[in-house]
Image (spheres, grey):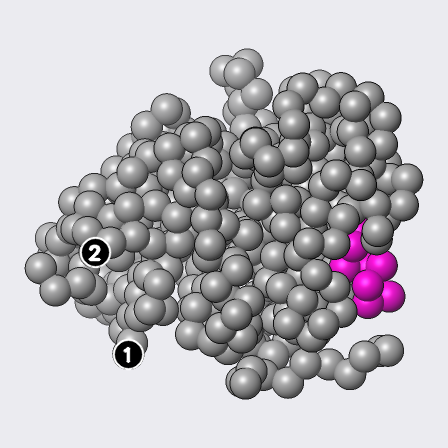
């Protein structure tokens, strides 16, 4: 039985997920960084392993880094860098970030809740719910299921390469405030010919834009309304929001930065997230993400049958790992595995990891491009901190 009541009926730039590498190295527990915000901050002390890992991520050329690790009864945050270039202000504790493709876990959770309620099936075709939307250039919605959308085995092309604001400085300046509808985004993807057959794993944000459209068709409400009613509200995620077309990050936050390969860093915080919709538009905090992923795996959001569906994985060669429904599965350096999702949009990077028993989560939020070592350093933090709770 769900812990939280459901509401009454009727009422990245590509993510960079394929760059995630296997994490490594476990270490002893770090001191609670919240204490550093008080008078004790004036007393120098050696940085613990979590702070060292955060410093290493910052050292890859990022602007700001915020991490949080949680286990029963404990919460350890750490940060490095600045919230905004030229100010010297630190990344705010509890600050909000664009979480990019970690949004997909929220979207998949709603779809699986609807499956558990008998409102749709993972084996329903896209054509059944969205007639005529996926067709042309070799695409056929009659051959693609809801499961394949969530699993990235639909063979539908990724639309994000067609969004100017995500792909160049000129495009960002010209179109950062442009509003897209989900139908427009899917139509852009349909202009590209099908190059592989359904069943082959290939990461595509278009899959989750379609999943959001199916949520609306099933419930009569937008995917964002359903996420708010089913997840954000019941869990009390006060710093998590579905911004719709608003280009602003509310409340205390770090700024996002990109150089688009030009060598000149541009503040790209202001961005209309309708371009990524149900695939990547949510704004959240490290604390809220920890709570969400814990609730997902402790049975608060999904019945066991639906969580089993979510965590049943297929090979994802681009990741050198496995992928379920809105979650990737990676090995831990200390043995076993963890579930994760990464995200990257408009100058922000995210990675969230949770152990299958929901006893430990790690979240790392980053601003700025960094370099080729940034993603591996983020994954190393995941392995280090998620292994810490295991008996060695």
Callout 1 secondary element? loop
Q: Which corner quadrant of the image does residue 321 belong to? A: top left
Q: Where is residue 116 in the image (x, y as percent from the top left)?
A: 64, 72
Q: Which of marks 1 and 2 is in front?
A: 2
Q: Which corner quadrant of the image does residue 258 belong to? A: top right
N-terminal of the pair, mark 1 or mark 2, is 1
Callout 2 secondary element? helix
Question: Is residue 290 among what the camera can see?
Answer: yes
Q: Name the residue under label 1.
A: 73
Disc number placed over residue 144 in the picture, else none: none
Q: How crowded is mark 1: few (under 14 residues within 10 Å), some or many (20 or more)?
A: few
Whether tag 1 and tag 2 are in contact, CB under 8 A, the answer is no
Residue at the spot 61% in from the left edge and 57% down from the top edge: 108
Q: Position of residue 247 (x, y in %)?
A: 73, 46
Q: Mark 2 points at which residue?
A: 387
- Specify the principal SS of the magenta part: helix
Residue 161 falls left or right of residue 293 = right
The quarter in which the C terminus is drawn is bottom left
Residue 33 falls left or right of residue 235 = left
In this picture, is 191 found above or below 182? above
Q: Nearer the viewer, residue 304 or 212?
A: 304
Residue at the spot 75% in from the left edge and 39% down from the top edge: 143
Residue at the spot 80% in from the left edge and 33% down from the top edge: 140
Q: Residues within 10 Å of mark 2 (few under 14, many from 20)?
A: many
Q: Nearer the viewer, residue 172 or 83?
A: 172
In this picture, is 272 found above or below 261? below
Residue at the spot 58% in from the left edge and 27% down from the top edge: 266
Residue furthest to the right:
132
Distance from the alpha carbon under mark 1 to that under mark 2: 17 Å
Magenta run includes residue 214: yes
Q: What stretch is highlighted in magenta?
A: 212-220
The quarter in which the N terminus is drawn is bottom right
């Amino acid at each position: 039985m769900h812990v939280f009541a459901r509401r009454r009926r009727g009422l990245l730039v590509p993510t960079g997920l394929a760059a995630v590498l296997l994490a490594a190295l476990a270490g002893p527990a770090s001191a609670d960084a919240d204490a550093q915000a008080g008078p004790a901050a004036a007393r120098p002390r050696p940085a613990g392993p979590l702070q060292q890992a955060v410093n290493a991520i910052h050292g890859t050329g990022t602007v700001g880094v915020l991490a949080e690790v949680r286990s029963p009864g404990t919460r350890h945050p750490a940060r490095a860098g600045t919230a905004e270039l030229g100010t010297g202000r630190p990344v705010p504790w509890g600050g909000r970030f664009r979480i990019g493709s970690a949004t997909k876990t929220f979207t998949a959770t709603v779809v699986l809740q609807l499956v558990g309620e008998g409102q749709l099936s993972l084996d329903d075709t896209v054509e059944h719910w969205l007639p005529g939307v996926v067709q042309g250039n070799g695409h056929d919605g009659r051959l693609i299921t809801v499961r394949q959308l969530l699993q990235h085995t639909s063979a539908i092309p990724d639309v994000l390469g067609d969004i100017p604001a995500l792909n160049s400085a000129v495009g960002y300046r010209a179109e950062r405030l442009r509003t897209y509808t989900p139908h427009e985004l899917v139509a852009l993807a349909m202009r590209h010919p099908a190059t592989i057959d359904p069943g082959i794993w290939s990461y595509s944000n278009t899959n989750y834009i379609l999943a959001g459209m199916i949520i609306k068709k099933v419930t009569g409400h937008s995917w964002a309304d359903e996420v708010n009613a089913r997840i954000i509200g019941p869990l009390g995620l006060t710093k998590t929001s579905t911004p719709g077309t608003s280009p602003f990050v509310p409340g205390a936050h770090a700024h996002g930065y990109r150089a688009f390969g030009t060598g000149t860093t541009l503040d790209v915080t202001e961005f209309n997230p309708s371009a990524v919709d149900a695939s990547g538009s949510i704004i959240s905090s490290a604390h809220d993400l920890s709570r969400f992923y814990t609730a997902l795996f402790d049975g608060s959001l999904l019945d066991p049958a639906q969580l089993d569906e979510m965590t049943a994985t297929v090979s994802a060669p681009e990741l050198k790992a496995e992928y379920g429904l809105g979650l990737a599965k990676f090995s831990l350096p200390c043995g076993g595995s963890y579930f994760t999702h990464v995200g990257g949009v408009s100058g922000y990077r995210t990675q969230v990891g949770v152990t299958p028993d929901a006893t430990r989560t790690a979240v790392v939020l980053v601003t700025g491009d960094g370099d080729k070592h940034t993603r591996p350093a983020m994954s190393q933090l995941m392995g280090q901190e998620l292994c810490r709770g295991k008996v060695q």
